[in-house]
Image (spheres, grey):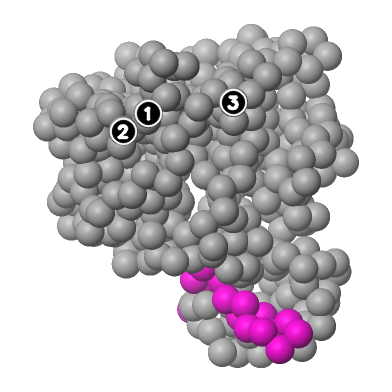
Amino acid sequence: MSLVQGIDGKLYGTTNTGGASNYGTVFAINLRGGLTTLHSFSNTDGSNPGAGLAMVADGTLYGTTFSGGTYGVGTVFQITQSGDLTSLYSFSGSDGLPVSPLVLGFNGMFYGTTAVGGSSGDHGTIFQISPGGTLTTLHSFSGQDGADPQAGLVQAANGELFGTASEDGQNRAGTAFSIRPSGTFQELFAFDNTDGNTPIGGLIQGTDGNLYGTTEYGGTSYGTVFQITAAGTAVVLYTFSGGADGGNPTGTLVQATDGNFYGTTQSGGTSTIVCPGGCGTIFKITSSGALTTLYDFDNTHGAYPAGGLVQHTDGNLYGTTSSGGLGDGTVFRLSTGLSSFVKTVPTFGLARATIAILGYGLTGVTSVTFNGTPAAFTLESPTAIRATVPSGATTGTVQVVADGATLSSNVAFVVLGG
């Protein structure tokens, strides 16, 4: 499970179990480690949320549970940062079982995947859901084009959505695909085990326009990091050995402000006495495939980090482990010396739309620009700015000048509507 940075600078996430009824929770944690349980699921409103959260400009969070709800097979929910939860949709089984996070599309709709269900043999689906809870199934996997998609989608700058299916395909090792919001589906690549097997983690689009991801197995059995070009050609950047460099990566990568990609492995590392097979690692990898192991988990600070990382605007990386610590997992911070920056929520918008700009220790803000075009703004707090996308702005970097320092967005803001 990956974390998401909120308007207030806190990190928000979910737990699969625990809470008042042991059906899982939504939590917030500040950067000093103070944790607040925002909601304990009761099963009727969903249970066992296994994925991260998506956030919109006002700070409202959206997520999924893979069980519970009206029919017992999962829900889509909305929750405010004060903890008010609304169940938007209950899955019935035929329309799938959601295990992935949602992504907000350019059209204001959310998109996600289900591991089972659909009209083509229970192989899973891709769905669209409105903020009000109206669900449309866009694609049912057949097995030939992949099955069991467990990761969320990413929307590229051209508006297409990209993702992975963890099983099947023509080589029975999983696939990568694209889908338009209209429902037009295209298989991009079928893994064949030599280049990876079981892509459980999602894809991200790098600043170079290529797609990057991981497979849990394949290569030499312990998984790979791969790149897919715009033409659909897959390149293996790194094959894990299962030893000191880690093994079995399952989380989605994050591209940090230094241009490198960061991720976690579920196994491997050097703590093989504490954890048979290793407690997992955190790694850095360049776009050319040079990998550096940054941290070996030792159970004391957590073990088996199954989710991806998030870079907070303070520059540090944050993530979670599924066990270790006091026994039930940890939230951790990794400091790599990266500087603070700003990020926009969402990363796209029409001219004159109001968006949030997240930061850290924001004071003395004197200007906000969208690819060089000045914008009207209001500083709401040391962690958030409200800004209006200026008329005439073009797609590019958002910059904030605060106390004489220029902070830039890591991801280009996409100006919609030409």
Which label belongs to residue 270?
1
How many marks overall? 3
The picture places residue 224, in percent across and down from the top left corner, at 25, 37
105 on left or right of 118: right
Q: Which residue is mark 2?
A: 244
- 353 shown above or below 324: below
Asked if the stretch drawn in magenta spans residue 402, the answer is: yes
Task: Please give the name of the residue rendered at 52% of the width and 57% of the height, measured from the top-left corner.
Answer: 336
Measure the C-alpha gap from mark 3 to mark 1. 14 Å
Q: Which residue is mark 3?
A: 300
Proximity of marks 2 and 1: CB atoms separated by less than 8 Å: yes
Asked if the stretch drawn in magenta spans residue 412, the answer is: yes
262 on left or right of 131: left
Mark earlier in primary sequence (3, 1) = 1
Give the camera-side residue of 354 and 39. Answer: 39
Q: Which amino acid is tagged 3?
A: Thr
